[in-house]
Amino acid sequence: MIPRRSLLGTLAVSLAAPSVAGSQTPKTLRFVPNSDLAVLDPIWTTAYVTRNHGLMVFDTLYGQDAAYVAQPQMVEGHEVAADGLRWTLKLRSGLKFHDNTPVLARDCVASIRRWGVRDGFGQRLMAATEELSAPDDHTIVFRLRQPFPQLPDALGKGTNNLCAIMPERLAATDPFKQVSEMVGSGPYRFLANERVPGAKAVYTRFADYVPRSGTASFMAGPKLAKLDRVEWLTMTDPTAASGALRSGEIDWWELPPPDLLPLLRRDRNLTVEVQDPNGYIGVLRINHLNAPFNDPRVRRALLGVINQAEYMQAAVGDDRSAWRDGVGFFCPDTPMANTAGMEVLTAPRNLDKARAEIAAAGHAGAPVTILTATDLPILDAIGQVTGDLMRKLGFQVEYIATDFGTLIQRRASKEPLAKGGWSALSYFTGGLDTASPVTNTPLWSNAAAAAPGWPTSERIEALRTAWIAAPDLAAQKAVAEKLQVQALQDVPYYPLGQYLFATSYRSNLKGVGKVFPTFWGIEKA
């Protein structure tokens, strides 16, 4: 879920603390992230802003390229035994941490172990691992219980949690406690003494970073730091952020709200573009523990009335270039996206049919509790669409509109409605997160281990396991089609469409990458 203060009017902090005014050297970039950098440890949280920070400071063993294929990054390469049960990874030579100590295989092993406790993909990998060792300073060995063809994809994914490589002394930290000292081997160093919590984070170029050869492509290839200094400034007032960008006091605003985009587009000194082709995916999450949505017949009835275009128009507006409907359980234009079974979501909507199916299941007029967040306008908008839909279906709707923090607290409740439980809520999640069955957490259907909503589907879980074991892309795609068909039967959640949000930066910035903010390859002309 997108963290609090991340969309539409919640983006940033006051110019008063600290001021962004002042001279800038050509090699300093000032950036306004989509939310405050409250947590620094990329293993500890799934916040996107922390992931983006983590990729400045830390490097990864593999990195996804623009085609979503994991390529060697910190490793020179790997060898796989004929039976697929032994992977031998070789580190590139000369890698160094920011504290001037060499990157050793034992650092990587400790980092992988810590990450594997917190991350879903990591948990799957570690469950398949009999032994993880560092027989020498440059060799990492996985001895597996069963083949795990997607080992590089797990270690190099761009979704949370990030498998960030840090010194062994830091990676020894309890995975459920935060690492506070930011020492990585990435292209930028974090300046802890200049951090102002809630307002500012500062990075400088790491002169001893060892880029790999080749062509930069998303998270893969050489990460050339061409800026001497990068300052992240949290700003709460969108109008002030817009003014700072247009005046040149800041260089890049990650996520301007849609209503300010026309103003920014009229400024010839600014570039406004969709940086992330994956965008955000809308999600209607239902609670599988409480009636009526514990009944699969009711869940399937809603498939015929969910109108993705209505949700996207409410959230983003009428500009069709900013959103897409006809979206399934995998992010559009990523390798697993498919059309299997999609007729149930794209056929003409039929409220009468859905009401009849709900009545036949014995749930006509059932009480439902809808949660929404009023302090995030984009979530408030889709929450209202959900509430209106539930009323049209004849449910007795209790509509709970609160701030996002209160919603998150109530979302964790497994109690019945009468004791503070809930029925449904609507939110957005990163499109890249929904690109695979492992990183798409709303798809997980492993009961108590699933995200709030707690769906249970042995078939979905069996297919997710089969996808991990699939030996090649063609086999993965075949499993993804079966998964989508099964998800349309069991309905762990409803996809609500794709929001293709825009970013804006000064036109003298060259080399701004795609997907999410990275700071290698960027120059100021």
Image (spheres, rainbow, N blue to C red):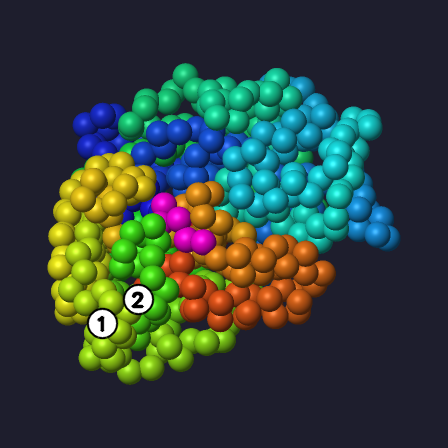
Residue at the disc numbered 2: 298
Q: Position of residue 258 (x, y in %)?
A: 23, 57
Q: Amino acid at mark 2?
A: Val
- The answer to which quarter of the image holds residue 3 is top left
Q: Is residue 22 above or below residue 335?
A: above
In the picture provided, is 390 more to the left or to the right than 519? left
Q: Nearer the viewer, residue 95 or 44?
A: 44
Under circle 2, the secondary element is: helix
Secondary structure predominantly adopted by residues drawn in magenta: loop
* Residue 101 position in % (x across, y down): 67, 19
Which element is circle 1 on?
A: helix
Q: Is residue 264 visible?
A: no
Res 359 label: 1
360 falls in the magenta region:
no
Judge left or right: residue 5 versus residue 139.
left
Residue drawn at 27 percent across, 41 percent down? 415
Range of residues picked out in magenta: 452-456
Q: Is residue 466 above or below residue 111?
A: below
Q: Residue at x 13, y 52 (%)?
A: 398
Q: Amino acid at mark 1?
A: Ala
Q: What is the spatial separation of the Cα atoms under label 1 and label 2, in whole angstroms?
A: 9 Å
Instruction: State the image quarter where residue 359 is shown.
Output: bottom left
